Image: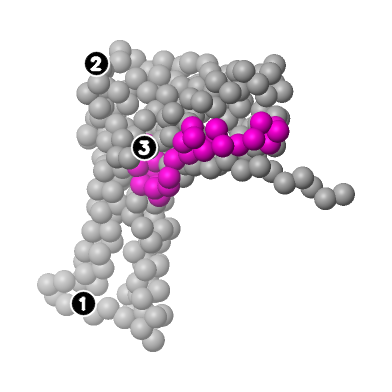
Amino acid sequence: MKLAQLQESFQAHVLRHDPSIEQHVQGDERFSIALRLGVYTGAYALRLIEVLAESFPAVQAALGVRQFAAHVSDFARACPSRYRSARAYGEELGPWLASRLSGPRATGIADLARFEWAVAGAFDAADQRALEAADLAAVALTQWPDLTFEFTPTLRCVNLSSNAVAWWRFACAEQARPSRWRPTCLQRWVVWRRDLGVFYRRLSQAEARMLEGALAGQSFGELCEPLDGPVRAATLLHGWVSEGLLSAARVREASGT
């Protein structure tokens, strides 16, 4: 067997417990084949658990160390990593935990995992120069209706239906532990990084609609329509600039006929 095939067979055993590698491993009285291979499969699972604990400290705080360890151990076995980078592993943890829990706690834990994943993603995202007010001041008034916007690569949008952010603040030692998990109406949050600080806040319905449109490539003129004029849209836009959410503004070229 060629080295590449041997490596693929070994990987299949570690990830999916495929037994084909066993015929290429020698055992003895002290260390059986199963024991030798188990060293690697066990170490791999333990490392994934460590990765998840580092990526989801707030979920760990909400569940408790022992319960978190039990759940992520099962998750690591059921959903081994498909990524080269350990940092990319764990996005599916929230829905998986929701399927294992019940009631408002299930929704809340899934929301908390989603929020925490967004925070980590914002922190790891690439840097990019933020758009400044002077950049917009240089745009001619006649061009504003066709102006479109690009956002910082650190921006993350999260929809929540629970008091998960209160649990996040508890994990960050910013407030006392909430008394219970509580369902809420749909909340739209944004998470982003500026310099080395990660920020987050809840959006109003109007701002959420405008942000959704802007992310979809709508022009400033189109963004103004549901807001009954440019004043409200300009106010929200000014907030995005001051917070460092925007990275560029471009005039959309007219489509050909």
Q: Is residue 252 magenta?
A: no
Q: Is residue 121 magenta?
A: yes
Residue where numbered disc 3 is placed = 194
In the figure, is residue 216 to the left or right of 94? right
Residue where numbered disc 2 is placed = 176
Residue where numbered disc 1 is placed = 27
Span colored in magenta: 119-145
User: Distance between the Cα atoms at labels 1 and 2?
Assistant: 54 Å
Tag 3: amino acid: Arg
Residue 212, position as x, y percentages in the image? 60, 32
Name the residue at the right extreme.
Answer: 257
In the figure, is residue 181 to the left or right of 30? right
In front of the other: 187 or 20: 187
Name the quadrant containing residue 1.
bottom left
User: How dense is the environment of label 3, judged by Cα within 10 Å: few (below 14), some, or many (20 and up)?
Assistant: some
Label 2 sits on a secondary structure element that is: loop
Label 1 sits on a secondary structure element that is: loop
The answer to whether residue 126 of the structure is visible from this angle is yes
The mark lying in front, picked from 3 and 2, is 3
Above or below for 41 versus 222? below
Seen at 31% across and 32% down, the residue is 59
Seen at 25% across and 27% down, the residue is 172
Seen at 68% across and 18% down, the residue is 229
User: Distance between the Cα atoms at labels 1 and 3?
Assistant: 55 Å
Above or below for 192 versus 91? above
